[in-house]
Image (spheres, grey):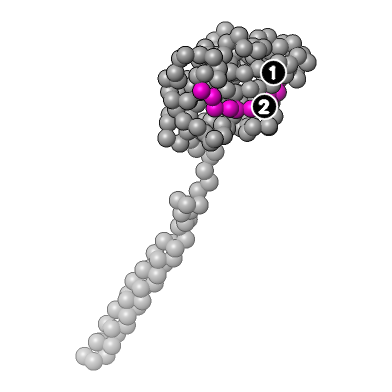
Amino acid sequence: MRAYIRRAVVPAVVLSVALVAGCSSGDKSADAAPKQEPASEVPIDPADLPSQAPSSSAPAAPVLKIGETGEFETGETDEYGENFKVTSKMSVKVDEAKYVTPAEIDTTNKPTQGQFVKLTLTLKNVGQAPADVMLYGMLKWENADHAAQDATTLEGVGDGPTLDTTYKPGQAVTGSVVLDVAAKGGKVSYGGTDDPEAEAAFVVELPTS
């Protein structure tokens, strides 16, 4: 009877070893499966990235103090007001900025904003084609406390050469405009440019006294 029991145990052990071997074989096949790349390592197609708006190609407007000279471009656009093309170039020199009273400019009108300032400029065509300049209605004043506002007036018209004209290459004019500003200091911007991407053609920093 004992001999029979020993013969029966042997096949059971063999079966147990076979089952264990089968499990090990299954684990190896699982380990052999191809690994997936982490999401962070997957290459990104540049075409899938959001496009950025192109920056303005207009040159920065020169910011000038008394006695300084800068240049600005003049040109034209197409019939739709787009595709600005430079045709010529102007230089501008800030000769003087003087705060004046109504009596000093021979007027009885008082400044609406608070203060008259007589701004004297020298404009010259340094380009290769005629250029039109129109300051009236195109000059805005602002400071840290006041938003931009129209500063042009009709005061002083007829007193000396007019700056608003067509300049042929090499031609220059020195003249003055009287501006109405809210306070001393701040800056005056000339927005008479056809370039839709330019905020101003040139900027003048006014003295505080």
The residue at 54%/27% (across/down) is: 99
Is the residue 197 above or below the residue 160 in the image?
below
Can you give x and y, in whole percent of width and height, for residue 131 in the image? 68, 12
* Residue range of the region highlighted in magenta in the rendering: 89-101
The residue at 70%/16% (across/down) is: 173
| Disc 2 residue type (three-letter) | Asp
Can you give x and y, in whole percent of width and height, for residue 126 in the image? 75, 20
Is the residue 140 above or below the residue 206 in the image?
above
Q: Earlier in the sequence, mark 2 or mark 1?
A: 2
User: Observer-nearest residue: 35 or 69?
Assistant: 69
Q: Residues within 10 Å of mark 1 (few under 14, many from 20)?
A: some
The residue at 65%/22% (across/down) is: 121
Q: Are marks 2 and 1 in contact (CB under 8 Å)?
A: yes
Q: What kind of element bears circle 2? A: strand
Q: What's the mark number on residue 95? A: 2
Q: Residues within 10 Å of mark 2 (few under 14, many from 20)?
A: some
Q: Using the rendered view, name the quadrant where residue 98 is placed.
A: top right
Q: Of helix, strand and loop, which mostly describes the magenta segment?
A: strand
In the rendered image, which quarter contains the N terminus? bottom left
Q: What's the mark number on residue 174? A: 1
Q: Using the rendered view, name the quadrant where residue 159 is placed.
A: top right
Is the residue 82 above or below the residue 100 in the image?
above
* Residue extending furthest toward the left: 1
Q: Using the rendered view, name the quadrant where residue 71 is placed.
A: top right
**Residue 38 within the magenta-colored segment of the rendering:** no
User: Observer-nearest residue: 139 or 52?
Assistant: 139
The residue at 67%/12% (across/down) is: 161
Can you give x and y, in whole percent of width and height, for residue 150 in the image? 47, 20
